[in-house]
Amino acid sequence: MQQQMENRLQKNSFYTNTKKSIHLFLGFFFLVQTGIIAQNINIEGTILDENKNTIPYAAIGIVEKSIGTSSNDDGVFFLKLTSLNLSDTLTVSSIGFKSYKITVKDYINKKEKTIILKEDVVSLDEITITNVKPNFYVKKALKNIRKTSLDSYYQLSILYRRFSTENYTPRFLVEQYINVLDKGFTLPSFEEIQVVENRKSADYRFVKKKQNFHSVAMIAKQNPLRKDFYANDYKWQIKDYSSYDGEEIAILEGIMKGKPANWVRLFIGVETYGIYKLEKSHLNAVYIYKKNQDGKLYLSYHNREYKSKEPISLYYRNLMKLKSKTMDVSYRHEAIVLGIETNWKNIDIRSNALKNRTDMGDYKIPYRKDFWKNLSMPPDSKFYLDNKKGLEAIFGVPLEKQYQAAN
């Protein structure tokens, strides 16, 4: 009787386990078929104009899902997606060109991974307000800045780079993945800053100039539109016309009264009065903005360069064969916005940088190779490769090994 009971239990156990296995298999098959288990998809390509010239800093992404990136200074882009995005629309936009749209699936099936943007020619005869004084555009843009841009709290995920050069030679690189809490043009600074990931090269600098703040904070603090910016402080003129995403743009240049070396250039929509791009003489800075799914503008790309002359010891002057008692030093900054989150429930920033008076090169955050490998980073630009080559040439150490040793 006992043997019969054991046989029956084994039979029932086999039946139960087999039934569970079938259910698990069917469940997994269902998940795969319905796309709930998503496969990673990497898409890359080059943005060109009709003359085959590359288009730098074009905005590429899925607007309605706040997924995106920018092409680098060589017009090349890279974006990590999943199979859940196959039916989504990829939108490519750049000032002066008609926006280009294609589904992710159709782009993947393209033989040549290039996107040709057609120039959006603006005829001055078609613009009905050319007789308006130039400062009218600026005043309207400043007045409507809350309507045209995001003015409620949101989170930006930023890839931030800082190359340090001495005597025009790259000697140090810091690269970080940063989350910031922002409210756009309505506040003079970021609300919170969190350095999430960090990697840096070996530090080959002689002067080792430090900043007692995190460099990413200067994106907001040095933006004139986030301060007391008055149109009447400048003498404005219309330099040209262009377009962005179907809207005509007036390109205006303002020369500061009494300080002719100081200028600001604004790219303003003639219908919405949104500010799509800002250039300024100070630090040769550039700010590029793009629209979210609601048509509100937010930062997409930024770069600037800080230059100074720093004193150098006699020993190092002789070592570098310098005649001057000072050395040319620069910080080249680049910020690429990789994502945006507007739902307050999904915003999670543990601030560790805003009030921390520490140079960004001194953050003690471990280097995680897998994170950087899986991050949707823009392809290496010529500028990046040239600096990388310079860093590796100093002692013949590959940058990847420098990351592992320095962090």
Image: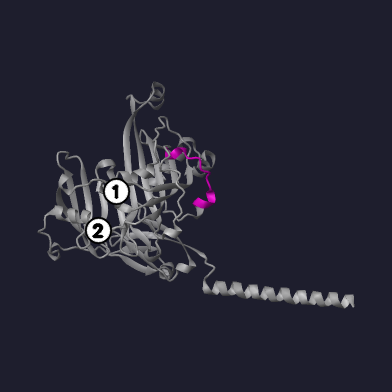
Residue drawn 74% across the image and 77% down it: 15
Residue 199 circle label: none
Query: Residue 323: image x %, image y %?
Result: 33, 24
The residue indicated by pointer 1 is 286
Q: Which residue is mark 2?
A: 274
The boundaries of the magenta stretch are: 359-372
In the picture shown, does residue 68 fall above or below 213?
A: below
Residue name at image x 40 percent, y 43 percent: 354
Q: Nearer the viewer, residue 356 or 161?
A: 356
Q: Residue at x 11, y 58 (%)?
A: 132
Q: Residue at x 33, y 24 (%)?
A: 325
Q: Nearer the viewer, residue 319 or 339?
A: 339
Q: Find residue 169 and report its image quarter.
A: top left
Q: Mark 1: give few (<14), some (14-19) or many (20+) Cα within 10 Å.
A: many
Question: Distance from label 2 to label 1 (Cα)?
Answer: 16 Å
- Where does residue 213 sit, x and y in percent of width and height? 39, 38
Q: Is residue 234 visible?
A: no
The amino acid type of the residue labelled 1 equals Val
Direction top: furthest residue: 314
Q: Could you say which is closer to the camera, residue 90 or residue 219?
A: 219
Residue 144 x %, y %: 23, 57
Sooner in the amino-acid sequence: mark 2 or mark 1:
2
Residue situated furthest left in the rendering: 131
Q: Amino acid at mark 2?
A: Gly
Q: Secondary structure at mark 1?
A: strand
- Which quarter of the image is occupied by the N terminus? bottom right
